[in-house]
Amino acid sequence: MTDLPVLRLRPKSKPQAIRHGFPWVFADEAVLDRRSRAIAPGGFAVLEDAERKPLGLVTVNPNSKIVGRVMDIDPDARIDGAWLAARLARALQMRERLYDAPFYRLVHAEADGLPGLVIDRFGDAAVIQPNAAWADRMADDLADALIRVTGVSTVILNGQSRARGLEGLEERMEVLRGQAPAEPVAVPMNGATYLADLMGGQKTGLFFDQRPNHAFAQRLAKEASVLDVFSHVGGFGLAALAAGASRATCVDGSAAALELAQGGAARMNAADRLETVQSDAFKAMEQMALDGRRFDLVVCDPPAFAPAKPALEAGLRAYERVAKLAAPLVAPGGYLVLCSCSHAADLTAFRNVSARGIGRGGRRGVLIHTGQAGPDHPTLPQLAETGYLKALFFRLD
């Protein structure tokens, strides 16, 4: 038997959710006494129901609203390098079946059995985001296991996410193994080439989650004029150019991101078909409407306006405003793609405000496709937060 401390559910808490796969224990569901509060953030404990029956092994953070995260249903499991390597190998096996090249999300947190941990792979380099205390504490073990399982030579820790603050973790950015790339990494995806800044870009440097939505947009982009708003490093815009768009305009507030978009277009011999506009996205759309500009395909992929429930109402208003401003920019018979990566805004709410915004923009349309994140971002059915990405494809009159 294990000699780990115990985290016990309160009598009114329902252990069935944990037994059926829900991976979190909230602070108000657990007995937080002197002993459980003494567990160091990121430590491990045996989770028991109110009758002292073991439910599994959890990592504990007494300072977080999520006080326990299920690591293993075996309460006697030992979380060490071998355990990490086994989880990573299982994640790698699926990605290698799905993708021909080693550019993908390797670990998608709870859905890959590694709660609070994100790992994106960029060829010979991997970027880890330890958004839970246990992963931050075991970062070196993770780096060693990554190298052993995948053969990468560089492991970068990017600890700059909002989620770390909720765990009481400080920001950190460092190279754990190998050397930081001397220049942005070229990433092939859907026939396009993207440049990912692994040390200074947003998140891990590139958003792999939109890959299937880029691919669907490509079917609408041949010989089309395309506007990609909130483009980051050219996500939809470069995909459209790879599919034969006549021209793509990328709008983003970051000069560095747009420079990477230009670099990607140059790698694709498409620099002459790319226009970049550094601007606040809302102001840019307002000005384009005043200028009478129209596009065959308009895509808006903004940051998370509703990252948590307290921001939901304001976030939905922002998504409605995006749709209202974007709709007039679509040529008659053209297409509008609206995206949300907000956990708190579910598909129904996002679809409703998007349709209302299109109407307020003076347009009508039909929904032709609803997209989500790619299979390298698996969804844990018991945890709605893992299915965060939504992409709505409309054809406007």
Image: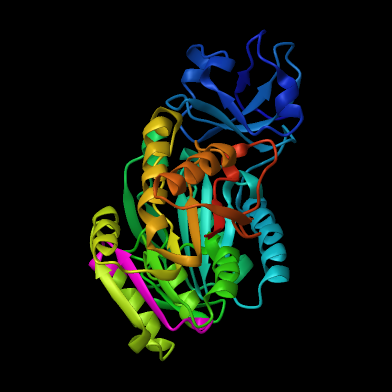
Q: Compared to 371, does 31 lie above or below?
A: above
Query: Where are the magenta residues, as a range?
Result: 242-257
Q: Which residue ends up furthest to the bottom in the rendered image?
A: 269
Q: Which residue ends up furthest to the top in the rendered image?
A: 11
| Residue 293, position as x, y percentages in the image | 32, 69
| Residue 248, position as x, y percentages in the image | 39, 76
Magenta span includes 248: yes
| Residue 17, position as x, y percentages in the image | 71, 25
Which of these two is toward me, 196 or 341? 341
Give the residue at x 34% y 59%.
174
Which of these two is toward me, 331 or 35? 331
For the N terminus, the image quarter is top right
Give the residue at x 51% y 42%.
350
Which of these two is toward me, 33 or 105? 105
Answer with the quarter of the image where residue 173 lies: bottom left
Q: How is the image coloured?
A: rainbow
Q: Is residue 342 visible?
A: no
Q: Compared to 321, does 210 lie above or below?
A: below
Q: Is residue 334 visible?
A: yes
